[in-house]
Image: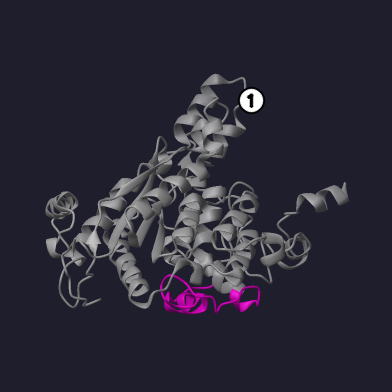
Amino acid sequence: MRNSKVVLIDTNPGRNAQTFGIARELGTDMDLIHEPSVGVIGTKGDSQCYLGVQNKVEAIQETLRQRVGLGEEKIQMRLVQPEYTVATSDGIRNGTREMRYSLIGREVTHDSVCQHLSASGLEGTIAVVACDKPPVGTLAGLLEHNRPAIIMSDGTIHPGRDSVTGEALDIVSGFQVAGSDDEEFKKRIAREACPGYGSCGGMFTYNTMQTFIGVVGMQPLHMVSPPSDDPHRINIFPGELIDYLANMIENQILPRDIVTRDSIRNAMVVAMAVGGSTNVLLHAPEIARAAGFRSFADDIMSPEEFNHLSENLVPVLVDVRPFGRYSMVDIDKNGGVQVIVKELIESGLLNGDTLTCTGESLAEQVKRLNTVGPDGEVIYRVEEPYKQTNGWLTRARRKSIA
């Protein structure tokens, strides 16, 4: 890493007292208190979506603490303590008065991330994100700050199992039985649908946007699909994230170098191919705005092109909830989202040359991961897809059809 000589400037003894103090309490070298800052952030709130975030943040922070210091192989930066954003969950608030807080959740996360990044002067950031809106708010803040940064999904929840039928259950199972008159049946489904912790397991907004963030280049592809309780997220991924971030800092690879017109277009195509949540049509323009684009329609993808891709060129390659049978856990067992990306690159539907947070192109990352081909049951080939089209249409197109 950098070998710049540290010069202490004692113009503010009060500030120095606190920076010396926090370095001492964090167990880091006090000679680095005036160096640029590096740190970890997370999204945290009242939902199973967020229950796994803190232990990942703490694992990354401890690994980072061991890597920060003086010496040629060390990251010569000031370590800041982790910060968490206020976050709510659509699922747990759905149908209540509190849902109005979820609807502004993206902006609340964005604002708090922006304050922390700027006030702490972060020159290197690792973000652990969960649920659906906070990841987008986090990415938008990182793009506006535009200093080296990388994202890791906290991970998905495992599906539950109906104790009577053996059928896989998830959060949508609970919504689907809400109209039943059988109170005991509804209670059983509610109790069995969401065991453990992690974000919603189907291709709802969370997994749609995590796939989007991976393909757009801000999250390593192999970190998207493993469940929240996968040991890799504690034992392996922290070190990998720090390696990637150190390379970004060393080579000044910035979020706006990664999130470009072509990478956003790639992410939109993959969102179609996974039959993802149409909320991507709300979030992709926000990501483009934060990346410096003035108009999503003019600069990234017009409604007409979007409709053409959706109706004619991009098939659905996965059999997943809410329209199918499987969950992100099953995608992970069959090679991860990188299988989908590889299939789309080889079919000419993605630009494999876009830069990613690993320092590789999208195609290079897929190749390094020794990505397998589609299994044909959970993940399908472009030539023999799960569905020929995904059914997405812009509002203008829907009106013209009506």
Q: Residue at x 56, y 67 (%)?
A: 340
| Magenta stretch, residue numbers | 345-374
Task: Give how far across and how far down residue 374 sits, in percent.
Answer: 56, 69
Q: Residue at x 49, y 50 (%)?
A: 137
Indicate the secondary structure of the residue bearing disc 1.
loop
- The N terminus lies in quadrant: bottom left
In the image, residue 375 above or below residue 204: below
Which residue in the protein does label 1 denote? Answer: 179
Q: Residue at x 60, y 27 (%)?
A: 178
Task: Give how far across and how far down residue 258 sits, in percent.
Answer: 50, 70
In the image, residue 388 above or below residue 324: below
Residue 99 appears in which quarter of the rendering?
Answer: top right
Task: Give how far across and how far down residue 162 sits, in percent.
Answer: 49, 36
Task: Give how far across and how far down residue 312 sits, in percent.
Answer: 77, 66
The residue sitting at the front extreme is 11
Q: Residues within 10 Å of mark 1 (few under 14, many from 20)?
A: few
Give the dominant element type of the magenta stretch: helix, strand or loop: loop
